[in-house]
Image (cartoon, grey):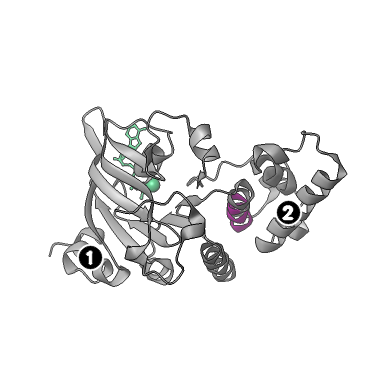
Amino acid sequence: MSTLSNPATLDPAATPDARPVLLAVRNLGKRFGGLQAVSDVSLELRAGIVTTLIGPNGAGKTTLFNLITGHLTPTSGDVLYQGRSILGRQPWQIAREGVGRTFQDLRLFSRMTVEENILTAMEHSAWLWQPGGRAAARERADKVARILDATHLAPLAQSRAIDLAYAERKFLSVARLIASHAKIWLLDEPASGLDPRSYDRFVALLRAQVAGGVTVCIIEHNLDVVSNVSDRVAFLDQGRLLAEGTPRDVLDDPRLASIYFGETA
Ligand SMILES: Nc1ncnc2c1ncn2[C@@H]1O[C@H](COP(=O)(O)OP(=O)(O)OP(=O)(O)O)[C@@H](O)[C@H]1O
Ligand SMILES: [Mg+2]
């Protein structure tokens, strides 16, 4: 297994399954009392591609994200980022190392403006309240302007997050990820509830970011979205990883389809 310590070594021509591994979970397990929410899951997220996690409600998808980002402690197994274990670190430490995420409930600073939400997500050295002279301030402002443009939020820069429409709040959560310079994005149902125009914008934004070197793992329920955006697909059911492969491998498997749609085969 090759691991990625330097994203600059990424070969854009490499097929998705030949890319270096940026983040790997090894035999990961999480028990909540009597419920085994995640069970012996091993999965590799390869650099510069989109891996999608699918599975029925309650399959353990969000729990898997929580285990990776330090919001939950695994009962067993390990999480390797750039080849090193990140087990036991705090969520903020893992985020600072470049593992970014969004939440199903978005978790923005609702009373802050769009611009302030972006500034607070920027790397430590660019914090709003940190001195740095005029050049640093100008650089920060330029960066915020670019992020606002990329996420179609420029006209709303001074609006409070709480006053945004749902799709705009979703774009703001992605804007914060761009600002944070996360190397890997874990997105929990980012496309759900988007109107068609916002959805198209989201896909275009995602593709541009992936082309720029960002690695993505998405939890997604809509199978049209899954086949549209994924390079690899992983299927979870009752905490177990049942399959991992190309979108066609996974989506065309009748056994998985019957589990996904709750039908008897
Ligand atoms: N903090 C917790 N305490 C107890 N049980 C939990 C906790 N978090 C999740 N669970 C349970 O673990 C299982 C997996 O939940 P999880 O949220 O990971 O599923 P999911 O695949 O993200 O589902 P959905 O598609 O509905 O978002 C569920 O049965 C859920 O009720
Ligand atoms: Mg979930």
Q: Secondary structure at mark 1?
A: helix
Quadrant of the snapshot with the C terminus? bottom left
Q: Nearer the viewer, residue 209 or 54?
A: 209
Query: Residue 170: x, y in percent?
Result: 58, 54
Image region (quadrant) for ligand 1: top left
Whether the magenta-drawn stretch holds residue 173 is answered as: yes
Asked if ligand 1 lies within 8 A of label 1, the reply is: no
Q: Residue furthest left?
A: 265
Query: Does the magenta stretch mainly form a helix, a strand or a loop?
Result: helix
* Type of amino acid under label 2: Lys
Whole-angstrom CA distance, mark 1 to mark 2, is: 44 Å
Image-based side of 171 in relation to 76, left or right = right
Residue at 26% x, 52% y is 236
Image-based side of 179 in relation to 246, left or right = right
Residue 110 seen in render: no
Image-based side of 99 in relation to 113, left or right = left
Above or below: residue 182 compared with residue 15:
above
- The label on residue 257 is 1
Region of the chain picked out in magenta, as a range: 167-174
Q: Nearer the viewer, residue 60 or 142?
A: 142
Query: Residue 205: x, y in percent?
Result: 58, 65
Q: Nearer the viewer, mark 1 or mark 2?
A: 2
* Type of amino acid under label 1: Ala
Residue 36 seen in render: yes
Query: Residue 24: x, y in percent?
Result: 34, 47
Q: Secondary structure at mark 2?
A: helix
Q: Earlier in the sequence, mark 1 or mark 2?
A: 2
- The label on residue 143 is 2
Query: In terms of image quadrants, where is residue 131?
Result: top right
Q: Residue furthest right?
A: 134
Q: Residues within 10 Å of mark 1 (few under 14, many from 20)?
A: some
